[in-house]
Image (cartoon, rainbow, N blue to C red):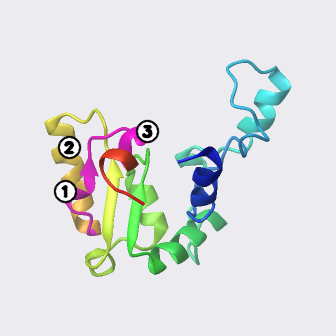
């Protein structure tokens, strides 16, 4: 696949960063060196999990609300580099056994030992996410080894 073909394919896949983003590439070059002002500017676009405030009357931010809308429409859900913190799963307002039963769900989970994977599987079960959703591949290998678009 050429770079143009890959870019066209990716443009049809919604990617939502619920905790913010460093910026769109290539507008924000992902380089190892940057000055303090640039670093401060891009760091303000990120929210750590405990910085996101839950709401009693809806979603905690537009990204979680948008995620919920897309999850409800999706037949296939793919998590890349997602840590499955219980607060994040809850904030989607979507994951229940009834909502997930007819959907294909995949997630990268590289480097998990047996005990960590068993712990994660037990934490995800009440949300309707089955053990086979967790694959050991890195994000870079996921599409070529696990699932085709």
Residue count near mark 2 (Cα–Cα under 10 Å), binned few <14, some 14–19, many ≥20: some
Q: Mark 1 highlights which residue?
A: 131
- Alpha carbon separation for disc pair 1 and 2: 9 Å
Q: Would residue 68 be counted in the magenta stretch?
A: no
Q: Position of residue 82 (x, y in %)?
A: 43, 48
Disc 1 or 2, which lies upstream in sequence? 2
- Alpha carbon separation for disc pair 2 and 3: 20 Å
Residue 64 appears in which quarter of the rendering?
bottom right
Region rendered in magenta: 128-142
Q: Is residue 144 left or right of residue 7?
A: left
SS at mark 2 in the image: helix
SS at mark 3 in the image: helix
- The residue most toward the right is 37
Q: Are marks 3 and 1 in contact (CB under 8 Å)?
A: no
Residue 115 appears in which quarter of the rendering?
top left
Give the residue drawn at x 19%, y 57%: 132
Q: Is residue 81 left or right of residue 137?
A: right
Residue 49 or residue 76, whichever sits in front: 76
Q: Would residue 135 be counted in the magenta stretch?
A: yes
Q: Mark 2 highlights which residue?
A: 117
Is residue 110 depicted above or below 77 in this figure? above
């Amino acid at each position: 696949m050429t770079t143009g073909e890959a870019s066209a394919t990716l443009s049809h896949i919604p990617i939502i960063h619920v905790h913010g983003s460093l910026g769109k590439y290539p507008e924000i070059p992902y380089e190892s060196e940057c000055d303090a002002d640039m670093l401060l500017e891009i760091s303000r676009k990120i929210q750590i999990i405990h910085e996101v405030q839950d709401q009693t009357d809806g979603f905690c931010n537009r990204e979680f609300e948008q995620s919920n809308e897309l999850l409800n429409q999706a037949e296939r859900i793919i998590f890349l580099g997602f840590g499955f913190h219980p607060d994040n799963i809850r904030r989607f307002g979507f994951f229940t056994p009834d909502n997930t039963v007819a959907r294909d769900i995949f997630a990268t989970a590289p480097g998990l030992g047996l005990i960590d994977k068993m712990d994660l599987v037990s934490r995800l079960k009440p949300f309707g996410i089955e053990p086979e959703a967790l694959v050991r591949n890195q994000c870079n290998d996921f599409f070529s080894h696990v699932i085709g678009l």
